[in-house]
Image (cartoon, grey):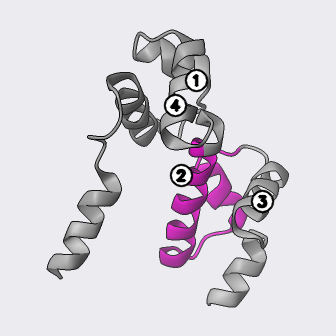
Amino acid sequence: MLLDYCEVVKKFSLKNFNHSVRKAIEFIRISLYQDLSLDMISSSINANPFELSRQFKKETGKTIIEYINKQRINESIHIMENENISITAVAGIVGYNDINYFTKVFKKIKGITPSQYRKLNF
């Protein structure tokens, strides 16, 4: 249990990121279910969008949109594993208004569609 706790702390730790990237990640985490864009995030944390984008990619290895999509897909999996609601509803909950786009992003990240994921895991 202690090892699990240490892994979780390490996974969510932001100490290795500079101030702007850390603030952006924190903002994304608390705003994951809303419409998010580089301009919205940079404005909210008082950062230059170009600099934030460049630094975010440098430090995380992902663009801001790639990071947001990965977080949303991970959250959608958590919801599918714990709730018995439609995939369309799951997509809406995690911030995707277009089920086709959600399916496309899910498949790109996980290699299978949300429906296939649900069938394989339930």
Contact? badges 3 and 4 (CB < 8 Å): no
Which residue does the image show at 70% across and 79% down from the upper left? 117
Q: Alpha-carbon distance for marks 2 and 3?
A: 13 Å
Amino acid type shown at disc 2: Gln
Q: Is residue 32 visible?
A: no
Contact? badges 3 and 1 (CB < 8 Å): no
Residue carrying label 2: 71
Amino acid type shown at disc 1: Arg
Tell me the element at label 3.
Answer: helix
Numbered range of the magenta stretch: 67-96
Q: Alpha-carbon distance for marks 3 and 4?
A: 21 Å
Closer to the observer: label 2 or label 4? 4
In the picture, measured across the screen, residue 55 lies left or right of residue 29, that is right
Q: Which quadrant, please, contains the C terminus?
A: bottom right
In the picture, measured across the screen, residue 96 lies left or right of residue 67, that is right
Tell me the element at label 1.
Answer: helix
Q: Alpha-carbon distance for marks 1 and 2?
A: 19 Å
The answer to whether residue 100 is magenta is no
Residue carrying label 3: 108
Tell me the element at label 4.
Answer: helix
Task: In the rendered view, tell whether residue 56 sits above or below residue 112.
Answer: above
Q: Alpha-carbon distance for marks 3 and 1?
A: 23 Å
Amino acid type shown at disc 3: Lys
Residue carrying label 1: 54
**Along the polypeptide, which appears first: circle 2 or circle 3?**
2
Contact? badges 1 and 4 (CB < 8 Å): yes
**Along the polypeptide, which appears first: circle 3 or circle 4?**
4
Amino acid type shown at disc 4: Phe
Where does the image place residue 99, in percent across and percent down from the top left?
79, 53
Tell me the element at label 2.
Answer: helix
Residue carrying label 4: 56
